[in-house]
Image (cartoon, helix red, strand yellow):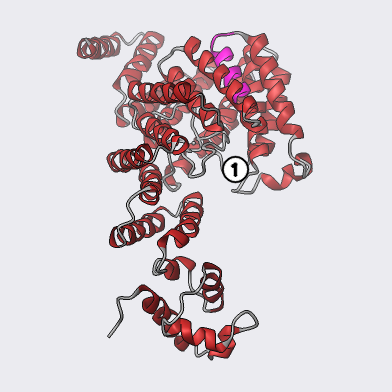
Amino acid sequence: MRSTDPKTKLGELFRDRRTALRLTMREVAGTLLSPTAVNNIEKGKINPTIETVLYLCRVLKLSPETALIHYPDFAKSAPVLLEIVDRYLAEHRLDTSITLLYDMVWVVSEQELHGLWYAEIQLRLALAFARLERYECARLTITQAYSGFLEHKNIEQKLLALYYLGSIELADRNVNAAIAIYRQALSVVRRYQYCHRCVGDILYSLAQAYLLQLDPDNALRASHGAELAYRKSNAPDATAHTLLQQAAIHLRQSHMDEAERLALQAQHYFATCDPDDVSSRADQVYKRQDLHPALSARGHAARLLGDVYAALERWDEARAHYAESIQFIGLSNRAERFAIERGLAEVALCVQDIASARRNIQTALLMCNEGAGAPQSCTTQLDSSNTVQDHEGMEGLQARRSEEPSRTREELLAQQRALAYRMLARCEQQTGNRAGYVQAMQEACAILLGAGDPLQAALLQTELAEETADWELMRTATQTLRRLHERLL
């Protein structure tokens, strides 16, 4: 009969595994332990250290969490278990993370250890649920984590929990709620005169939320606050990302000189911050999935400069920066690749290079199709470390952050595909192919309707109707717009 004593259960686990592998105690002991020590551990007579448990797991080819979950003193095994969870979250092994976390919840409940460990477990459960877009579960667990940190007066983790809660709301398209939570977190910062990189993360995300509200002035103020917080906490990488964020805001406001200055400044930082010589590895990165953060950010900066120069009608410089961006972004960041190909197509259309525009549009559509078949990723920028964001062109809630994190992944792909077909229609229009123009526009409208976006579909229909003098289509589209307007009122 199996024992319920933790030390005995741990010993039985090692003994069963050793027997299954047909190893002697001497072979397991190696040079670090004695056969007697192995025998006593297997019989539950002594409690091994965490280091000994990890050693035995390596020798017996056991996953560390399998043994650590039975360790008698959870306060000692919990930090190692949480490190394992963090690694699984970073590898997007979400189901494995959730299973292990619930095993830890069971141990905490059994040993009556409710407190900070329980809050840390709930925090990571919220991350996993958010990445699976199970937002109600994420809200429940992050609220429990917040309560635990609040009870133990852990200000740093309390702020982190508020940051995650705001990011969850932002991912679930509750922008007003996200802004309110971020501002609540900032009131905690002011109350305790707290200074940490997490403050910059909160302000950076608040700026993103204001952008979704089409409030560039408040977005710029929040981004400047994030830059100041990052500089105070000596986080130059994050500081450079705030410069990119500010450049994007100025670009939206048509402040081209300021957008160019900030983007160049950020690009220079990312081009020089990697000690392993970023340029020499750029040709290898193109085919990699695990892009170096400096490379990905440098590509994002180059793409933003391409947008600036395209807006200034400096076509050659725009093309050069888009080409540089492709070199550093690689194949894995489909959202960024789509933005680059779209920019190249816009430049080609403006200089009447229809053949190049078609090629870029087809590549953009390929990015959308590959994205539709790719594994689901987090739509928020959530990271399980205390320095919350990695700021890699973060699709980021996580992820890795898209420029509009409040959209679902499917909606964003539909918007991108519709935009690509709209640009294809412009190609047909410039070549005088009326039938091709109509077909491409109809395809764009169908994609938007299929994605549940009747407003954008109706706007495209009015454009198509005006171009083709199809007044029946114009009447239908106008009626749709009127109904949507009345519904909003």
* Vertical order, 144 against 7 (above or below): above
* Vertical order, 487 against 137 (above or below): above
Residue 212 image point, x, y percent: 42, 20
* Vertical order, 211 against 94 (above or below): above
Report the quarter where the C terminus lies. top left
Residue 100 image point, x, y percent: 38, 59
Q: Quadrant of residue 318?
A: top right
* Residue 354 seen: no
Q: Quadrant of residue 75?
A: bottom left
Residue 167 image point, x, y percent: 41, 32
Residue for point 35% across, 49% down:
115
Helix, strand or loop at mark 1: loop
Depth check, front residue: 22 or 27: 27
Depth check, front residue: 192 or 298: 192
216 is within the stretch colored magenta: no
Q: How many discs mark residues in the rendered view?
A: 1
In this image, 136 relative to 374: left or right? left
Residue 370 image point, x, y percent: 48, 43
Depth check, front residue: 447 or 336: 336
Report the quarter where the N terminus lies. bottom left
Residue for point 45% across, 26% down:
404
* Residue 98 seen: yes
243 is within the stretch colored magenta: yes
Residue for badge 1: 331
Amino acid at dot 1: Leu
Question: Which secondary structure class fits the magenta region best?
Answer: helix
Residue for point 44% across, 71% down:
67
Neighbourhood count class around disc 1 (C-alpha, 10 Å): few under 14, some 14–19, many 20 upward: some
User: Which range is magenta?
Assistant: 241-254
Residue for point 45% across, 29% down:
416
